[in-house]
Image (tube, rainbow, N blue to C red):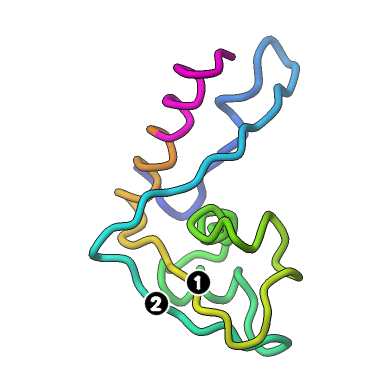
Amino acid sequence: MNLKYYNRYSPFLVNGVQKTVPFVTLPSKSSDIVFFYKKNRTRLDKISQQYYGTPFFGWLILLANPSFGGLENDIFDGAMLKIPFPLESSLLDYKNAVENYYFYYGR
């Protein structure tokens, strides 16, 4: 799996039409990393670059921290963020969460 970029929207493209992307959360793992957010000094793309080696997984960090909703601007200064780690198993957790969503709620 190429981990430099993962198109999380491709599973939701059906016959050229973009379907709704369900909101799912990621389970906690003992390998997850704790990071303290510094408002106006850190950004999710920079955190993603630091821990994953690519800036494209800020969305994954947000999914692991559902109390902040879906916007980076809602993260307050000093907030403790859970960084899902390692990346590959976290992406598998995401795929499984989407499949579980579809199992319970349909497509």
Vertical comparison of 24 with 16: above or below: below
Left or right of 89: which side holds 16?
Answer: right
Nearer mark to the viewer, of 2 and 1: 2
Q: Amino acid at mark 2?
A: Val
Label 2 vs label 1: CA separation?
15 Å
Q: Is residue 31 above or below residue 106?
A: below
Q: Quadrant of residue 93?
A: top left
Provide the residue designation for mark 1.
Answer: 49
Q: Position of residue 52 (x, y in %)?
A: 41, 66
Q: Are marks 2 and 1 in contact (CB under 8 Å)?
A: no
| Direction from residue 58 to residue 30 in the image, left or right | left
Question: Tag 1's secondary structure?
Answer: helix
Residue at 45% x, 17% y is: 103
Q: Which residue lies under the disc numbered 2? A: 34
Q: Name the magenta segment's main secondary structure.
A: helix
Q: Amino acid at mark 1?
A: Gln
Q: Position of residue 19 (x, y in %)?
A: 70, 22
Q: Which residues are magenta?
A: 97-107
